[in-house]
Amino acid sequence: MKKVLAVASGGGHWEQLMMLRSSLDPHDVCYATTRRDMAATHGIEPVAELLDCNQHTPIRALLCLIAAIRLVLKARPSAVISTGAAPGFFCILAGRLIGAKTLWVDSVANAEQLSMCGKLSKHVAHECLTQWDHLASDTKPLFRGSVL
């Protein structure tokens, strides 16, 4: 059984992570999100809470990055998975630094191009997936279907 850190921002990112939940059940999973209330809706407790942030909130992003590093150092997962957005990317980055396997699943909402964090994850995550066949490449991101 692997220790997995599963991270997603609130809203659609979280709902897509929840669609992957059954595949994570055999593992020791630690969940993290920006909205504790959404985790409670799915009966997930405890849950680590990270600041919601994006490219337009640089101070919050820095604080989120620090919190993500602390979370990964405390949890010591062997794998990190995220469906987005920035807080998930920061956990993927921190996971790589401690030797964890990492998986980025770009949101289905990004039908025209990868998200900004998806573009960054192509270079950081061990695996980077898109939910749109026409956005896939021979290397990263790959298309393995949609979670919806």
Image: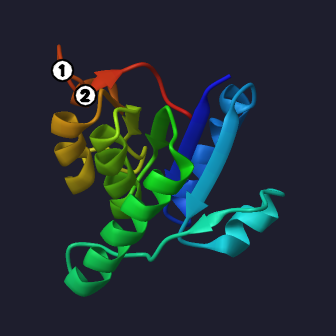
Total labels: the figure holds 2
Q: Is residue 49 left or right of residue 56?
A: right
Q: x, y percentage for residue 83? A: 45, 46
Identify the image quadrant of residue 48.
Answer: bottom right
Kind of residue indicated by mark 1: Ser
Report the residue at 53% width, 58% height from top. Answer: 12
User: What residue type is disc 2 on?
Assistant: Pro
Quadrant (top left/top right/bottom left/bottom right) for the C terminus: top right
Q: Secondary structure at mark 1?
A: loop
User: Which of the 4 image quarters holds residue 17?
Assistant: top right
User: What residue is disc 2 on?
Assistant: 141
The image position of residue 143, as x and y in percent, is: 35, 21
Q: Residue at x 55, y 44 (%)?
A: 5
Is residue 115 visible in this depiction of the protein? no
| Residue under label 1 | 137
Q: Which of the labelled discs sits on residue 95, or is there none? A: none
* Circles 2 and 1 in contact, beta carbons < 8 Å: yes
**Residue depicted at 47% across the width and 22% down the height:** 145
Residue 89 image offset from top left, x and y in percent:
33, 53
> Mark 2: which secondary structure?
loop
Q: Is residue 63 above or below residue 81?
A: below
Distance between mark 2 and mark 1 Cα atoms: 6 Å
Number of residues whose C-alpha sits closer than 10 Å to that of mark 1, classed few (under 14), some (14–19) or many (20 or more): few
Q: Can see residue 43?
A: yes
Instruction: Specify the quadrant that holds the N terminus.
Output: top right
Going by the picture, which residue comes out furthest to the right? 43
